[in-house]
Image: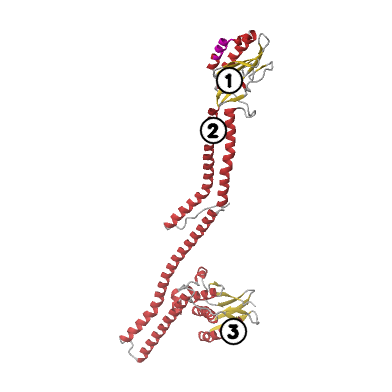
């Protein structure tokens, strides 16, 4: 899930969840302040501080009912009603008495015009909105002015059979107080809901973002200190996860680059050491023979000529080594131009082996060429560079040949996309542990022996670079005492 989707869902949740929770909170608070939700409009007074006042009111009301039942004309006495009214005022209640359609008494705490509109008609029944067992359930709250009142009604007849009604009225409390308390409680609940909801959602969303960013920060600090082994683990599929993957790839590339740079530095040092070693031997010989001439050791024209010829040979060796180094350097830097063309590999190998045979005859070696087919087989190759490959491999076999008669064989095998050329000899072979290294520059299986044989350790390294530029591969197989086989492949020409 992307960060954009996560943020969108969190924004939606921050809107919907608080709304739902706020509605639930409003219902619960309304239930706590205004009654049982089951009955909606009715006021439940259980566990309410007003309940104590209602109990007192009921006691006074029962007393009035008993007096009314025995002597209803008492309700026409103003002094009696004022005495009852004082008792009711102590519990925040009052009294209204109606004779026929005329209000004969109204408590001072009420406005007569407002009260009259709320009084029910005479129905010749004893109707109270509280049960006589004093369990105050089902009281109908009535709004008069800015306050809530509970009104009870008791109908009776005066002694002259005039209908009368007694109305005990209790002031439950100002609406503003209940509204204020309700609004404050609801406001606090909404604020708490917003804080908790936003906090939880922010924590969940930010954790999925901040945690991988902190991991990236730690890894960047480690890389800054030079530690390239610190990996970045991130398992999310969002943009941060993609960033972590990109950072990890960058770290691996950087580590590979640093390792390659260190390896190149080691190779450079090894190259300088190898060049110095290979140049020291012929230069030492040149210096020795030159000093021999200058010091008069060569005291005859024949010796002088021999010394000069030796100096010339060593100078040629140095020149060849410099040419090999220069070629290898350009191949390594990919600055050596290649002239690729379609050539018939059968015809090419025939001409190449004929040229090599002339030099091999002087060494007493026999060169044998075998073709898998006599039909033309076209490959993409650079003639000059490919000749250098064959020459270097054959020269390597000649330099290390220790058998008589020495034999070198060249075989071409045709594949579907590549042709494989094998050059084998019956020489001393190569130790198994040395096979992976023979294509490295300046590597010699036996250093002293290769120097005496004229090898400089660059021939096979150059051959490998050339074949790689052709898009092929090169490898060797060998057994000590059984000879060596070197294979390389070339791409066939398409069409």
Residue situated in front as seen by the camera: 147 or 40: 147
User: Which residue is label 2 attached to?
Assistant: 183
Of the numbered discs in the image, which one, if any, rests on residue 350?
3
Q: CA distance from mark 1 to mark 3?
A: 134 Å
Q: Can residue 195 be seen here?
A: yes
Q: CA distance from mark 2 to mark 1?
A: 31 Å
Mark 2 or mark 3, which is nearer the start of the sequence? 2
Say what secondary structure mark 2 lies in: helix
Residue at the extreme bottom of the image, as rendered: 301
Of the numbered discs in the image, which one, if any, rests on residue 15?
none
Say what secondary structure mark 1 lies in: helix
Say what secondary structure mark 3 lies in: helix
Residue situated in front as seen by the camera: 232 or 428: 232
Please tell me whether residue 128 is drawn above or below residue 9 in the rendered image.
above
Of the numbered discs in the image, which one, if any, rests on residue 112?
1
**Image depth: mark 3 or mark 2 in front:** 2
Q: CA distance from mark 3 to mark 2?
A: 105 Å
Q: Which residues are magenta?
A: 77-85
Q: Indicate whether residue 417 is drawn in magenta.
A: no
**Image depth: mark 1 or mark 3 in front:** 1
Mark 2 is surrounded, within 10 Å at the Cα level, by few (under 14), some (14 to 19) or many (20 or more) other residues, namely: some
């Amino acid at each position: 899930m992307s960060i954009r989707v996560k943020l969108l869902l969190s924004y939606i949740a921050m809107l919907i969840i608080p709304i739902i929770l706020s509605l639930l909170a409003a219902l619960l608070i309304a239930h706590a302040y205004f009654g049982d939700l089951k009955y909606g409009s009715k006021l439940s007074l259980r566990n309410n501080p007003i309940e104590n006042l209602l109990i007192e009111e009921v006691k006074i009301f029962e007393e009035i009912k008993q007096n009314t039942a025995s002597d209803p004309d008492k309700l026409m006495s103003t002094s009696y009603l004022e005495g009852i009214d004082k008792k009711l005022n102590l519990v925040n209640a009052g009294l209204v008495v109606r004779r026929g359609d005329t209000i004969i008494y109204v408590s001072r705490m009420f406005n007569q015009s407002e009260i009259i509109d709320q009084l029910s008609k005479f129905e010749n029944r004893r109707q109270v909105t509280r049960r006589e067992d004093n369990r105050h359930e089902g009281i109908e709250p009535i709004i008069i002015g800015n306050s809530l009142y509970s009104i009870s009604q008791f109908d009776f007849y005066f002694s002259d059979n005039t209908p009368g009604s007694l109305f005990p009225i209790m002031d439950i409390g100002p609406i503003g107080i209940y509204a204020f308390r309700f609004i404050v409680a609801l406001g606090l609940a909404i604020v708490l809901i917003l804080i908790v909801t936003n906090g939880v959602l922010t924590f969940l969303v930010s954790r999925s973002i901040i945690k991988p960013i902190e991991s990236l920060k730690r890894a960047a600090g480690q890389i800054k200190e030079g530690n390239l082994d610190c990996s970045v683990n991130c398992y999310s599929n969002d943009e941060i996860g993609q960033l972590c993957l990109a950072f990890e790839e960058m770290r691996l590339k950087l580590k590979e680059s640093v390792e390659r740079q260190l390896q190149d530095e080691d190779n450079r040092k090894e190259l300088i050491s190898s060049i110095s070693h290979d140049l020291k031997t012929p230069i030492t010989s040149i210096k020795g023979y030159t000093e021999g001439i200058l010091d008069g050791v060569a005291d005859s024209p024949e010796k002088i000529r021999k010394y000069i010829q030796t100096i010339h040979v060593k100078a040629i060796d140095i020149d060849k080594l410099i040419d090999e180094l220069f070629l290898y350097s350009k191949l390594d830097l990919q600055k050596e131009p290649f002239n690729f063309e379609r050539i018939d590999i059968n015809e090419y190998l025939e001409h190449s082996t004929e040229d090599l045979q002339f030099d091999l005859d002087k060494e007493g070696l026999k060169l044998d060429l075998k073709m898998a087919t006599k039909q033309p087989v076209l490959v993409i190759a650079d003639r000059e560079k490919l000749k250098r490959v064959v020459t270097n491999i054959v020269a390597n076999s000649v330099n290390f040949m220790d058998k008589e008669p020495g034999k070198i064989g060249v075989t071409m095998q045709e594949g579907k996309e590549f042709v494989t050329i094998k050059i084998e000899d019956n020489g001393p072979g190569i130790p198994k542990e040395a096979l992976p290294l023979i294509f490295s520059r300046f590597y010699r299986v036996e250093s002293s022996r290769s120097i005496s044989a004229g090898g400089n350790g660059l021939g096979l390294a150059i051959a490998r670079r050339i074949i790689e530029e052709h898009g092929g591969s090169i490898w060797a197989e060998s057994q000590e005492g059984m000879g060596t086989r070197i294979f390389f492949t070339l791409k066939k020409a398409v069409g």
